[in-house]
Amino acid sequence: MTERQQVRVAGRTLAVSNLDRVLYPASGTTKAEVLRYYLEVAEVLLPHLAGRPVTFRRFPDGVDAEGFFQKRCPPHRPDWMATLAVARSDPDEAIEHCALDDAAGLAWAANLAAIELHVPMGRSPDLDRPTAVVFDLDPGPGTGLLECAWLAVRIRDVLATLELRCVVKASGGKGLQVYLPVDPAVTTFDDSRAFAQTLARGLEGQHPDRVVTTQRRAAREGKILIDWTQNHRIKTTVCAYSLRAGSRPTVAAPLRWEEVELARDTGVSEDLVFAPTSMPARIDELGDTFAAALEATQRLPTLREARGE
C-alpha cells in the first residue's frame, strides 16, 4: 500500500510517498534521507542547475535494482514545474526536460527516486553555447582516483600556462572531472570540443603510458581516459552535489585543489570520497567550492596556442 503524505517545501505543497523505502540497501539509506539531503544542499546545488535541462537517473526500486535515465519531464509533473526544450537533429523531436529552479523541485525529483541529476554544459537562454569545457577523467582497469588526481593537477597546470583557471570535482564514482569555465557569448561547442581534444591528445602524447583519449577498452588498461567527447550540446555530466547511485551513497563533491594534491602525494584516495551526511558541515565550513564554475568569463585560446605553437 502506497503511503502518501503532504509536505510543505519552499512555499509549495507536495505529495510524497513511501519515504521509508530503502533506496541504498547496503547503508539502509531511505528515500526520506535522500530527500533531506537534497534540501540540505539546495542553496549550493540550485545555482548549478539553474537554466539547465535536467536528466534524471531514477531508481524507484533502489540502487540494487536496474535504474533508468529519464530525459523527458514526466507529464504528471506539478503545474508550477518549468521545462526547457532540448532540440534534437529533427526540430520536431525536441524533448522537454524538467528545470529544477527551487527546493520544491528538488524535493519533487527526490520523491521520484531521481537519485542522480545530470545537466549539459549549455545554459538557458542559449543551450547551444557551453559555459564550461569539461575534462572527464575515467580510470581504466588497474587505475583509480589517485591516478585521476595526478592527471587533474596536470591538466590544471597546463591550463595555468594559458592563463586559464579551472575547478575540480569528484564524479562520486571512480573518477574526477575538471571544469574550465568559459564565456558562452564567444564560445561554441565546436570550440570547446576541439580545445578539449587538443589538450587531451597533447597530454596523451606526453604521457602515453598513463593517459589515453580513445574509448577502446583494449587501450585503457592501466591508463586514465580523458573523455573530451563530453563537450557536446546533447551530452550531460553529473551535476555538482548530486548523489550517485553506487552501492553506498556518495556525492559528486566539489574539491579544493589542495585536497587533490594531498591525495596524489599521500596515496590516500578516501579523502576524495564524500558521503552525503558529511556535506552539510563541509558546505558550512567552505561554502560552494565549485562556485567558480559559474563565472563564465574566460575565453579559450586558439588551437595553435593550446598546442604551444
Image (tube, rainbow, N blue to C red):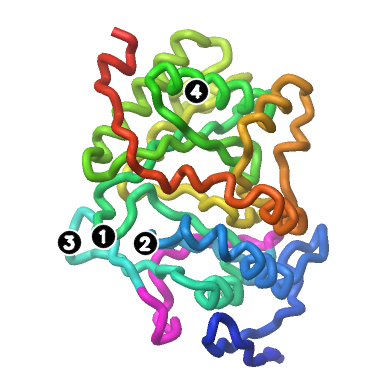
Point out the stretch of residues depicted in magenta: 63-82
- Can you identify the residue that label 3 sits on? 91
Is 240 on the left-hand or right-hand side of 5? Answer: left
- Can you identify the residue that label 2 sits on? 51
Q: Are marks 1 and 4 in contact (CB under 8 Å)?
A: no
Q: Earlier in the sequence, mark 4 or mark 2?
A: 2
Question: Mark 4 is on which residue type?
Answer: Ile
- Taking the view exactly as shown, the residue that stands out farthest to the left is 91
**Marks 2, 3: nearer the viewer:** 2
Report the label total. Answer: 4
> Tag 3: Cα neighbours inside 10 Å, few (<14), some, or many (≥20)?
few
Residue that appears at 55% across and 37% down: 168
The quarter of the displayed image where residue 101 is located:
bottom left
Residue that appears at 62% across and 85% down: 16
Is 159 on the left-hand or right-hand side of 282? Answer: left
Q: Is residue 249 visible?
A: no
- Can you identify the residue that label 4 sits on? 155
Residue that appears at 52% across and 59% down: 117
Q: CA distance from mark 2 to mark 3?
A: 20 Å
- Can you identify the residue that label 1 sits on? 125
